[in-house]
Image: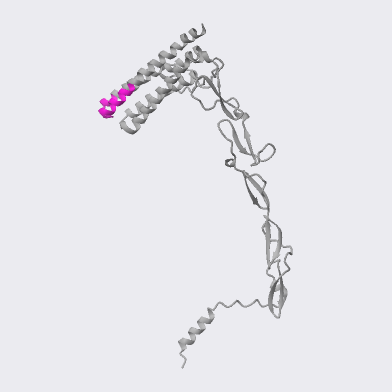
Amino acid sequence: MIRLCTVLSVLILLLASGRPARAQSCTTSVECNDSNDCTTDTCVQGMCSHTAVDPGQSCDDGDPCTIEDHCTNGTCTGTPLDCNDGASCTDDSCDGGTCVHDPNNDRCTGSNECAQATCQPGPGADAQGCVIDTSSFENTTCTDDMNPCTTDVCHAGTCNHDPVADQSGCSPVVPSYNRALDLRAGVERLLAYMDNGAQVGGDTSGRLDDDLAAVAVDLDGTAAVLAGRTPDAGNPQVAGIARPVRGIPLDVTTIGQERGRVALLWAAAAPAHVVDFLTALSAGRRHGDLTAGAASELRRNGRILLAGTKALKRDVKNLQRTFSVFQR
């Protein structure tokens, strides 16, 4: 005896067995069109038949970025349009049947402070499609070699450090220049201590930062002029000192007396700004904005900085007399 539930189970298994779908019925071949250029559609004995055409027959795969579309095993396939322009610095692609070549400057090498490499395939470009521009940087100032008696300018894509014409006239500048750099490094150490060790609070922190920033401007300007550079004047009326504004060129071969005269406009203001720093430090200690230990360390270094900036002012002032001696 066969139970009904067993029969139902067998029927369910047969229905789920994945047998192919029944072919489309038809009365004419027109009803069998599958919109595929790579098949021949016919109605055979009331059923549609789709037979692959001979391989290689032309077709259209609907992709404008392919060419030479042809049939293969009943499918239309094309060859991707070759958009390679031969320049490795471009990103090549196809958009709507048109080749697009987007430049990528990051793939160009040779850029530096005296040259700029850009992706510009065409005449004058290298094998990667890059063009290096050096003319725009010719004779512009480049990295300082920390020697006040050389000129630091770009030439033919390279930062050159050529000696000034009159080395004997420039040599008196060197000690003052080095002193300005050493004092500037001392300002950075003070700022670092304030950030990491002193733990200055209240309004005192901002006042001390501002005073040291003013000293930094003074020292940067002094060093720049002594090196024959045009300095960034910052505030041209700091502490009542009139200074040349940025943009007034200095003759890179101007030495001794002339450099000392101009540098003094910066060096003269530095001691007063250090005094402002020490005054703000004392006020901050009275207000409890920093500990006794931190105040003592900042005061000690501030006094060293004051003595150094006074000596720098004196040295720069004496450059004019030193220059006269060298000229005799």
Residue 107 lies in the magenta stretch: no
Compare residues 25 and 7 and report the one nearer the observer.
7
The quarter of the displayed image where residue 42 is located = bottom right
Q: Tell me where residue 66 appears, x and y as whole percent.
A: 68, 56
Report the label total: 0
- Decide if residue 128 is on the left or right side of residue 211: right
**Part of the protein shown in magenta:** 283-302
**Residue at point 28%, 23% (across, down):** 282
Q: Tell me where residue 93 appears, x and y as whole percent.
A: 63, 50
Residue 201 visible at all: no
- Decide if residue 231 is on the left or right side of residue 34: left
- Decide if residue 281 is on the left or right side of residue 101: left
**Outermost residue toward the top in this view:** 328
**Outermost residue toward the front in this view:** 168
Q: Tell me where residue 76 appears, x and y as whole percent.
A: 68, 63
Q: Main secondary structure of the magenta part?
A: helix
Vertical order, 121 against 44 (above or below): above
Residue 288 lies in the magenta stretch: yes
Residue 121 visible at all: yes
Q: Tell me where residue 281 appears, x and y as whole percent.
A: 30, 24
